[in-house]
Image (cartoon, rainbow, N blue to C red):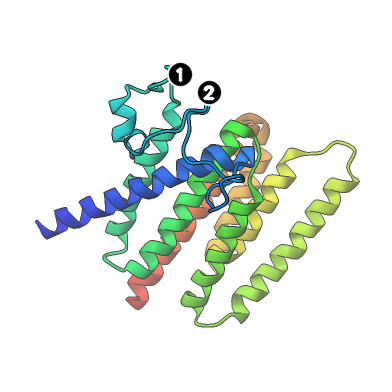
Amino acid sequence: MTFAVSYIIVFLFGVLIGNFTTTVFYRLPRNIMISGFDQKSTRPPFCSKCGHILRFYEYLPIFSWFSTLGKCNYCNMIISKSYIALEILVGLIGIILFYLMNNNLEYFFIYFCFATLVLLNIFIFSVHNFIPIKITLTIIIIGMIYRTLIDHEIFSWIADFSLASILCLWIIQKNLDSKNLYSYNQSLVHLILPASLWCQNYSILFVATNIFIFYIFSKIIKNKLFYPICVISVFLISLISFMNLMIDSSI
């Protein structure tokens, strides 16, 4: 019974974070303030079509979508299913990670943040065709904390991140020199920098191999799928590597 209650609490926590994630998903690409006390620069939740300010029960996680039958109560605009999908996915990810981490809350929260940010990046990229720098930077900062906890030092991840930064500078320079701006170069930078922190030793070789293979077959899998597939592989390889490390050292 205790386990069931724990998983219910984790799922509710996940959908609450997922609800905030939907706010970021809508507002970040449109440069709308997410929060703040200055009412001139921010807005409470509102309908994206008619602009009507929503009441608290109209933006509750999951329940509000079903209670309104997926439509705005004021203008009847159909609410995108992406929002409820994002909320449910974040909740399910929370349950899966809680199970895998075996009640290790420290690493649960770290990987939960990583997974949520990856999912948010994928949703924004799929809809708006760009990768937010702010989210990638957040993934990098959390990766620094993660590697410090895993390695018990900072020199290792500083060396890895420095090499990755040099490689990314070369990629950016090649992009600037090219007459045809190749969209994959931007994706590579957003993949290489996080991977240098979240993956280490042999796992970074798996990531590099995956990115290289997907890059070669990029014309087949198309632009829209290149970044999502690669960033998911970075997350999964990092998680599998961590699980193996946890088994070996009983973190």
Give me the disc on residue 49: 2
Work out whether residue 82 can be spotted: yes
Quadrant position of residue 29? top right
Secondary structure under tag 1 reads: loop
Quadrant where the C terminus lies? bottom left
Left or right, 120 with reference to 181? left
Q: Position of residue 146 (x, y in %)?
A: 49, 70
Q: What x and y, as percent, mark residue 68?
A: 32, 24
Q: Callout 2 environment at 10 Å: few (<14), some (14 to 19), or many (20+)?
A: few
In the displayed structure, 176 sits above or below 127; it is below
The one nearer the camera, 220 or 226, is 226
Residue positioned 73% across, 64% down in the render: 165
Given residues 126 and 222, the one toward you in this image is 126
Q: Which residue does the numbered mark 1 point to in the structure image?
A: 77
Q: CA distance from mark 1 to mark 2?
A: 7 Å
Q: What amino acid does circle 1 point to?
A: Met
